Amino acid sequence: MHLFVLGPAFGLPAANAECIAAIALLQSQAIKDWSIVPTSTIEPTLPLLVDGQQHISGFRNIARYVEEKLSEDILISRPRDRADTSAITSFLESNAQPLVDISLYVSFENYRHTTRPAFTRILPWHANYIIPPKLRAGARIRTEHLGVASIDVDNVHEDMSNRPEGFDGVGKQEGFEKQTQQRASLLLPRKDTLKSLLQRPERAATFKLHALANNFFEALQELLGENDYFLGQELTSLDCLVYGHLSLMLYPKVEQDWLASTMRQKYKKLVAYTEFMHTKLNMQTNVDDVVALAKCQTVEDVVAYRQACGMALPWSPPATPSAVEIIRSTTRAILSNLPVMEESPVVTMTTQGKYAYLKSILPLALSLMTTAAIGGLYYAFTTRLLAWPTGEQVHIFGRKRLQDYGDLGDALSGLSLFSRQANQDAAFHAQEHPGNPVQVDVAIEGDVGR
């Protein structure tokens, strides 16, 4: 088995919750012949499990596949109450994922200082311009309804909905100019008061974030209760999914750590549960060691390097994208940013079944057409089927002569030469036999006798 994930990052084996959950699910089994492959693409949906000819994407599908195939030998018990599992899973998707999105992507400081550098360490150069912005754009769309855009510097100057009451009227009161002239102190900035601080958009967003975090953590801690795991005393795939979300809230070292601090201060049982799962499954990951696996040439080198570094997870060298994959992903990213190709979420949901195949092959078709055009032009120029215009082979500088115009030019040149020779002979004869001027009287008939 080969599990393709987006990662590692933040000291964890992956950068998103479902990939971490899939690794935890397979790590808790007695299977030896499986490996983790870091990838630089997010399509198809990650995590992606490849088992022979089987390709399974998404944590739910992977968990179902593992339970059906390894139901006898698996150390993870199959969830007995599917209703509770589905309910808690939906609760995580609707409440935990937005908190992770806000903490790692929407928050500009966290994204700039933590998330973006983490992706820079693991992604090739071209993917750094595609994957992080795409993930952040998706996170901003998913959390737009929560009204916390003020923690995002990209939107703070555009969002005017959270201005304090009376903000538009500042400086427009009657007599303002007169008071300003009388008291120069009015020109100085006023000190912040408690009310003005609380009315700032970023403060209001902080209160809202703490409320969202408390609502999620409190409900989740009640579901855990006094049990070791969420569905009793046995570890299930649901615990792996919960751990995937909680680990991204607890372990990344971010500038604005409101989420981790809330969890550590008020919900110590969830912290203990996350650290227990983290230690039990040996999920601690050194990113530099995993990236260095790309230098290994053989499988034996990979195994030896993993043993030397003390890796508990079965890491494989990162997947290297081919030229076709790079062109396809770049083309798809460019097309997705064009207004003509962009679609609203509603249109996507209603038409994805009808146009899914066409949309999937469009980037590949354009990539193949571009590659064929470039290859055809290169072949045509190298075989001289097409020649770059370089002008005449012989360049004549200056005014052309009559001889340069073919036979007619030669004939005209001969006449010109004969005329020039006659003129020269006449001039020479005039110099050898000079004559005196002769005065001649000329009479015109009709004028005689007058």
Image: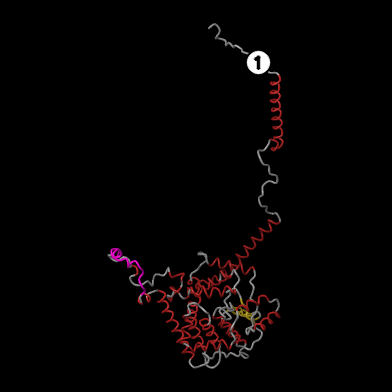
Q: Which colour scheme appears in the figure?
A: secondary structure
| Depth check, front residue: 110 or 409 | 110
Image side of residue 450 versus residue 313, left or right? left
**Residue 433 within the magenta-colored segment of the rendering:** no
Q: Would you place residue 299 above or below residue 385 in this image?
A: below
Q: Magenta stretch: give its range.
A: 176-192
Q: What residue does disc 1 label? A: 436
Q: Amino acid at mark 1?
A: Asn
Q: Is residue 169 visible?
A: no
Asked which quadrant contains residue 182, the reply is: bottom left
Residue 203's spot in the image, x, y percent? 41, 76
Furthest toward the top, the residue is 449
Disc 1: CA contacts within 10 A as few (<14), some (14-19) or many (>=20): few
- Quarter of the image where one finds residue 196: bottom left
Task: Identify the residue at horizontal 53%, vertical 75% (top origin).
Answer: 115
The dominant secondary structure in magenta is: helix
Quick check: can you spot residue 388? yes
User: Residue at the location (37% across, 77% down)?
Assistant: 198
